[in-house]
Amino acid sequence: MKRIFVSACLMVALLSTASAKDGSVFVDLFNGTNLDGWTQRNGTATYQVEGDVIVGKTTEGSPNSFLCTDKLYGDFELKFDVKVDSRLNSGVQIRSQTKGGTPSGRVNGPQVEISIDKMAGYVYGEAAGGWMTPDADRKPHDKFIDGEWNSYRVLAKGPKIETWINGTQISGLTHMERYQSHPKGFIGLQVHGIGAGQGPYEVRWRNLKLREL
């Protein structure tokens, strides 16, 4: 009986390990306490922790800023909630890199748009050729709610990137060229640059969770 019990426990442990390896488990990208595991790249915007939220705030005259995961990801499902000031454009980088692979190099790669201009959820190539979602597929929509928390889901598998906002699918993009140049990279939280005499504006993220596929 004891041997059966031990065998059962071992089987549960093995199944749990396999489950973690096959990507069925979501992990928190933000520990809810500090920004360990993240590094800021480019720009001088500020990032701080307020409760269970990461708050990015613009700095006048700064170029785009990015708070990036130290870990790199290829195929994954990403979920997060975001709230952005009405006059600020933002985004979340996926599979992104820095030019030359250096810490100070220009951040580049696919970006999932965060904005109130009816283009939220489409995919932009930050310093990588502009819009990845074709013009004909970028249909204006009202799924992103101004002044509220909005829930995003991003599924990146091979050359296909799918996005949802508040449960509605926005994009189902297949982009082989960008997949070949950016098959893997960091997740980055963007605070968009602003000009002189503007801001400060804020963008907030919470419930950042990812499972590798």
Image (tube, helix red, strand yellow):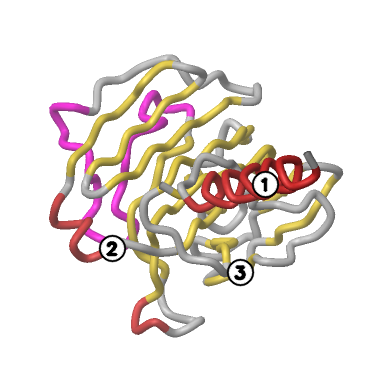
Q: What kind of element bears circle 3?
A: strand
The answer to whether residue 204 shows anywhere in this view is: no
| In this rendering, position of residue 101 left or right of residue 2 | left
The residue to which callout 2 is attached is: 182
Instruction: Write down the region rendered in magenta.
Output: 116-137
Closer-to-camera residue (42/1): 1
Q: What kind of element bears circle 1?
A: helix
Report which quarter residue 81 is drawn in. Answer: top right
Queried whether the magenta region covers residue 99, the answer comes back as: no
The residue under the point 22% across, 36% down is: 173
Q: Are marks 3 and 2 in contact (CB under 8 Å)?
A: no
Q: Which mark is residue 7?
A: 1
Mark 3 vs mark 2, CA separation in Å: 20 Å
The residue to which callout 3 is attached is: 40
Q: Amino acid at mark 1?
A: Ser
Mark 3 Cα within 10 Å, few/some/many (few <14, many 20+)? many
